[in-house]
Image (cartoon, rainbow, N blue to C red):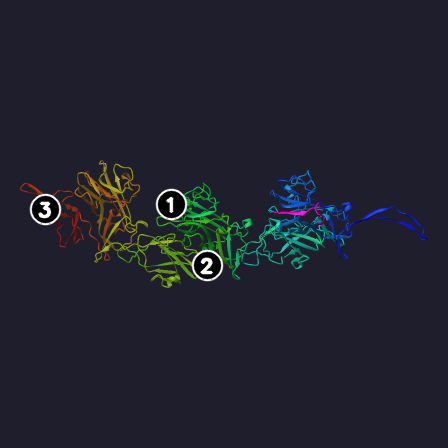
Amino acid sequence: MRARRGTGVVRAVSATNQIGNWSNAYHFQLPDLNTVVFNATKASVELRHHGALPDLNTPHLVDTYVIENGTGSDDTHENSTTLTVGEVSTGYQAAALIRIPLNEVPQPSGARVTEAELSLFAEYGSVEDEPVAIRPVLQPWTTSANATTYDGTNAWAQRGGRSIGTDIGGYVDLVDSVADDWMDFDVTEAVQAAMAAGQNHVSLMVYTSSQTTDEITFTSTEGSASERPYLTLTWEDGTVATPTASGVNAAPTSGSIVWDTASHALKADRSPTFSWTYSGSTTATGWRVFIQADASNDMAGLYTYDSRSTPAAFDITNLTFTPPQDLTFAQEIRWMVQPMNNGMLGPRSTSTIFYLPNDVGEEINSTHATLSIQEGSIIPSTAYPSVTSDTFLDTGNIYTNRGASSSLYVGRSQVSTSNPNLRSMSLVNMDFSSLPMPGTYEVVNASLEFTAINVYQSTYVAVGETTTAWTESSVYAYPAGNNSTWASAGGYSEDDFDIPFNPAQWVNATGTTAFNVTALVQHALANNLAELEVVLFPVGDRAGAVDGRVQFASSEASNIDVRPRLNLTYRIVDAWVPSQPTGLTPLDGTTLWDTSKPRPSGLNSTDFTFNLTYSNHTQIAACGGGDPSFLNEEITTCWTHDEIVAGLYGNDTFDFLNNTYTNSNLSKGDFWIYWRVRADQGDRIGEWSSVNKYRVPEDQGSDDGNGNHTLNLSRGSIFDYSGQLPLVEDVEIDSNATVNRGTSNTMVLGVNSLGTGQSRILMEYDLSNIPWPSAMTPTQMMLRMYQPGVSGTSSTTIAAYPCSGFTESSVVWATAPSCSTSEITRSTLTLNNPFGWMEWDLTSLAQSNIANGNTTMTFMLAMVGTTGSSHSFYSSEYYDATYHPHLVLDYVDNVNGIVPPAQPTLTSPADGQVLYAESNGLLTPSTQPALTWTPVSGSNGLHRHRRQRDRCLQIPLVGGFRNHEHHLPL
């Protein structure tokens, strides 16, 4: 109907039909209202601008718009025929304001508003599908509002009135924009709230997101009459109280992560139960639950669940709600609840957030599950979980901290790839103790996965468990500040990390590289530690040089997918691992001699045994070789007992019941063989034993087939690289010197090098660690020394004397050991042969010491008399071991206990005597000198040595030689 004006007068008529005067004229108007009657108790009415009573401008809707900045932001727009919303041409946001009176059209008595709808006409050319929100305005704005003030005087909290919570409230409806059509917004909540607050109007803002890049134009109250904004109110009979108190979100608690606790895998509960509390005095006959489509942007939309339309999802009595479908639209869930009383909407609760984690786990079966652990991968928006610490150490920059780097380097220094001696290694800690793992579980498989983003050549990378505490601030120079130290320089040794559990592996391509860390994780869990802490280091060649370099992404990499990842497969049983074997034999540092042989020789075969404290193991594994870290694949062999039993290693055998492995073909040489063993039980990998080492000597010396054995012994002649055997000390002591000469590679004997004193040589051969036959009896022991030069003018007589022990590195003339005055032997060194080997017969010393159980030969060579020359000899420090002093030891295995005769004493000619023959007054050399000596009890023959030029002749003497005299033909 259209609004009409009318005039009314009345007059009275009596019972006898007498007519009175007319009353004064009263004027009235009939409003033009669009109404819809739904039923006897429910109807709606439209409130249009000046539509009910145009002559009275009733109802009077007020609207304008504000631009947050730029051109037009200081202007007012109350007279504009359009309302601009969205981004204007200057790049700033505009929002419309509209205020609608609620009391200018009389309200039905005994009724309540149960629905309210705001209709706006979006004009032609407006952008479509842009979310447009209606928000209650919290400031008392007027048509003087602009970008800075809401009434020409008082400032908005944020330019353009866009401060949510201060200038405007949360939106009550969100609708995608259209063009050249009406847009209808449900503003029931805003209207009911205004009426409950006793307000005579509802004040609203038409708002778009600050990310909006387009413009929507609505017709204003000044525009075309058919397109002006209007409000439709639906009234129902009966008045009920509007809830004035909100609910309070209870669970899931704010900031919590909602896991599926019914699963033994780590995955989200995507249909969690929401609960809240309510303390309002007004009964709540129903509830609405709101979930933002985007927790950080309410303009993305709301998912609304209403107990009136989905009653099965709500428990009104216990104030809970369970979504009817899985929540798959977002990970960060921001939610609110709203009480209702017979259609009257109360205030929304303060929103809280909980998180639905990414599904990083998956059930395999009823007992097994997988898990992928990666920094920030479960809830990227909060960087959860924070599980990884990593950094790299670089010998090229020893003081530079790399904890914040997005990369980890292993191999040649990232400073330079041209220097093979500069290197980098990386430290990684994965602590997953904060994850909600099952109460009981053990890992059956674990791999540490890296993404190689750059490689240079090929890098042989090993993973070891760290033993020195470190942080991301650690550097090569120190692990925790400059007052701390690594156990070894730069943490680059097995003093700072354990021997790698598994072999190293080559990395030579970009992409994913995975290292098996199953045992390390199993052992940590068995010790109640849910973490993995390792070092990744390059394995160099035998000289220690590193060939390649690999660049891995670190936990600081911006792309979560390339960060280090720990992949686990686990089962829900108690964690247990076989403990390390103990009691290993051969013992650590053992030299495996074959004592059944008459000469020092190495075993060809031996048993390796160990002890276990359990018997439920299913496999024995072992590794052995020349590398103490078991990383050099060329000299390391690893096997399981099944492989031994299958005959894959020759004639080796394994006794599983008695934990005994028999190696049938031991390697011999100057090297240590390192070995370790472990026991496994199914998927449970045991701990390695301690590392033991042994060595097997080459068979020493020779024999003549008649029981006479000969050994050539010098410093390290049996073992050198693996620890010297025998130990030999030799040093020159100078009567005029106070400085020790133990490191010199030459020794002077006779007159000292300055010609002002005397030089002697102290020597000690420790043969105690060499196994000898129990009845070993020396038949001869010759000392041989190489003379590279001599200076002087006369021959020098040198005698040997037995001595007590000394220390090569400190002894000088003044601290020389005590020596016997009885000569062992003597020899005269001439000037005829300045180069070559010189000999002294020390047989009596060997026989005497051995007979008394002493296998250490300590003696001194000293000049006899005061005249002589300076004779130089190579010491055991000389670089070429071929010229080292050595003993030539001949012996027999004297099982019959024959006592060798004592050393004879020469009587004539005297030492150094010149033998002449006289004939007719002429002196000539004696051609048949007579040699005499004292008789020796028990001898039935002897060996005689004559030095002739540069060679020594050994001539056997027959047993019938009784008069202790012999003529020596020249």
Q: Which residue is mark 3?
A: 927
CA separation, marks 2 and 3? 88 Å
Q: Nearer the viewer, mark 1 or mark 3?
A: 1
Give the farthest residue toward the bottom: 646
Residue 608, percent from left and from top: 36, 58
Q: Amino acid at mark 2?
A: Arg
Image coordinates for residue 374, horizontal then vertical, percent:
50, 52
Camera sees residue 813: yes
Report how far apart the C-alphas of labels 1 and 3 lie in the structure.
74 Å
Of the numbered discs 1 and 3, the one sitting upstream in the chain is: 1
Query: Label 3 sits on what residue type?
Result: Thr
| Quadrant in the picture for residue 273 | bottom right
Name the residue rendered at 20%, 50% in the picture: 902
Numbered tag placed on residue 418 in the rendering: 1
Read off the magenta span.
214-226
Residue underneath mark 2: 684
Q: Which is in the foreground here, disc 1 or disc 2?
A: 1
Say what amino acid the circle numbered 1 marks: Ser
Q: Nearer the viewer, residue 473 or 441?
A: 473
Q: Secondary structure at mark 2?
A: loop
Confirm whether the magenta stretch covers residue 223.
yes
